[in-house]
C-alpha cells in the first residue's frame, strides 16, 4: 500500500499522510488512558474517625446512647432538679469548703463556673475574688435567671451570667485563670469540643479544675454513669492538649483534678 502511495503522491503529501496516521494513534492511547482514569480516580478510603464519638445502644438508660472514648454520656439534669444542687447537706457530703480552699484563688482571678446551675459555687467563689469576676456559664435560661435573681439579692456584682451552648461555653480567649466544672462534664453532649474551647479560654497559667464522683470507689452512692475515673479524665483531656498537673483525693466522694495547657 505504501508503494502505491509513493507512486501517486509527492513526498510532501506522503509525509503529511504518515504524520496524520501517527496522529491517529494518539487518541487511541488517550482513550485507553481514559478507561483507566475512573479506576485511578476512585475516592481514597475514608479516614478513620478520630473524634472519639460513637453511637450505639445505651448500656445505661440514664445515658443518651452517645459514647466518647468508650464512656457513655449521661443525660443532663434539667432545671427541675435545681433544689438538689442547693440541698442543705451538700457542703458536708461533698466537702465543698475544702474544695474551695484547694482552688487557691487569688483576689484578682477571673473564674468560670461551667454548669453553674443555681450558683452554689458561683457565689462562694465571687466572695473569694473581690477584685476579679466569676463567669457563671449555663445552657439553660431558667438557671441563668436564677443566677441573676441571686446576684441582685446578694449584690454580687462581679458575677456575670453567660449563656453557653453544648459545644462552647462562650468564654473570652486567653483570659480565664480558673475554670471549675463540678459534676457536669460527664453530661456534656460534646465533651471534646467543650474541652477544646476551655483550653482556648485559659490564660497561659490558667487551670481547669475538674470535679467528678470517683468511679474507682464502689462505695460512692452515685450511679456509675455519673462517675468518672482519673484514667478516663486524663485520656479525654489529653486529646485536646491538657495535662494533669495535680489531683486532690481527700474529698469525701469526688476527684478534684487540675489540668493545664
Image: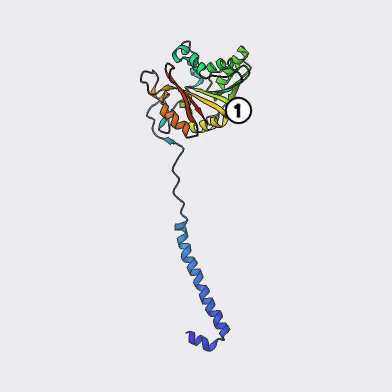
Q: Tell which residue pokes out farthest to the left in this image.
A: 218
* Nearest to the observer: residue 9 or residue 101: 101
Quick check: can you spot residue 224? yes
* Nearest to the observer: residue 251 or residue 92: 251
> Around disc 1, counting alpha carbons within 10 Å, would you say few (fewer than 14), some (14 to 19), or many (20 or more)?
some
In this view, 79 is above or below 54: above
Q: Quadrant of residue 202?
A: top right
Q: Is residue 154 left or right of residue 58?
A: right
In this view, 17 is above or below 220: below
* Numbered disc 1: secondary structure: loop
Q: Quadrant of residue 57?
A: top left
Q: How is the image coloured?
A: rainbow
Q: Tell which residue pokes out farthest to the bottom in this image.
A: 7
**Residue corresponding to mark 1:** 175
Image x and y of residue 95, in percent: 46, 14
The residue positioned 59% from the left and 30% from the top of the image is 174
Quick check: can you spot residue 136? no
* Nearest to the observer: residue 210 or residue 194: 210
In this view, 120 is above or below 51: above
Image x and y of residue 213, in percent: 43, 21
Amino acid at each position: 500500500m505504501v508503494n502505491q502511495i509513493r507512486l501517486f503522491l509527492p513526498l510532501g503529501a506522503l509525509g503529511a499522510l504518515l504524520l496524520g496516521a501517527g496522529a491517529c494513534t494518539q487518541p487511541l492511547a488517550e482513550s485507553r488512558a481514559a478507561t483507566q482514569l475512573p479506576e485511578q480516580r476512585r475516592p481514597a478510603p475514608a479516614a478513620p474517625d478520630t473524634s472519639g464519638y460513637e453511637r450505639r445502644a445505651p448500656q445505661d438508660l440514664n445515658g443518651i446512647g452517645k459514647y466518647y472514648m468508650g464512656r457513655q454520656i449521661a443525660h443532663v439534669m434539667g432545671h427541675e432538679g435545681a433544689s438538689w444542687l442547693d440541698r442543705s447537706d451538700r457542703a458536708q457530703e461533698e466537702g465543698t469548703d475544702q474544695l474551695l480552699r484547694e482552688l487557691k484563688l487569688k483576689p484578682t482571678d477571673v473564674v468560670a463556673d461551667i454548669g453553674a446551675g443555681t450558683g452554689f459555687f458561683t457565689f462562694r467563689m465571687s466572695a473569694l475574688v473581690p477584685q476579679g469576676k466569676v463567669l457563671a456559664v449555663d445552657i439553660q435560661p431558667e438557671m441563668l435567671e436564677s443566677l441573676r435573681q441571686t446576684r441582685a439579692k446578694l449584690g454580687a456584682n462581679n458575677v456575670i451570667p453567660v449563656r453557653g451552648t453544648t459545644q462552647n461555653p462562650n468564654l473570652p480567649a486567653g483570659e480565664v485563670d480558673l475554670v471549675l466544672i463540678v459534676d457536669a462534664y460527664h453530661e456534656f453532649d460534646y465533651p471534646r469540643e467543650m474541652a477544646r474551647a476551655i483550653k482556648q479560654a485559659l490564660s497561659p497559667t490558667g487551670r481547669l479544675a475538674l470535679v467528678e464522683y470517683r468511679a474507682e470507689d464502689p462505695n460512692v452512692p452515685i450511679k456509675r454513669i455519673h462517675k468518672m475515673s482519673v484514667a478516663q479524665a486524663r485520656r479525654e483531656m489529653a486529646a485536646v492538649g491538657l495535662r494533669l498537673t495535680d489531683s486532690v483525693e481527700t474529698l469525701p466522694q469526688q476527684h478534684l483534678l487540675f489540668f493545664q495547657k
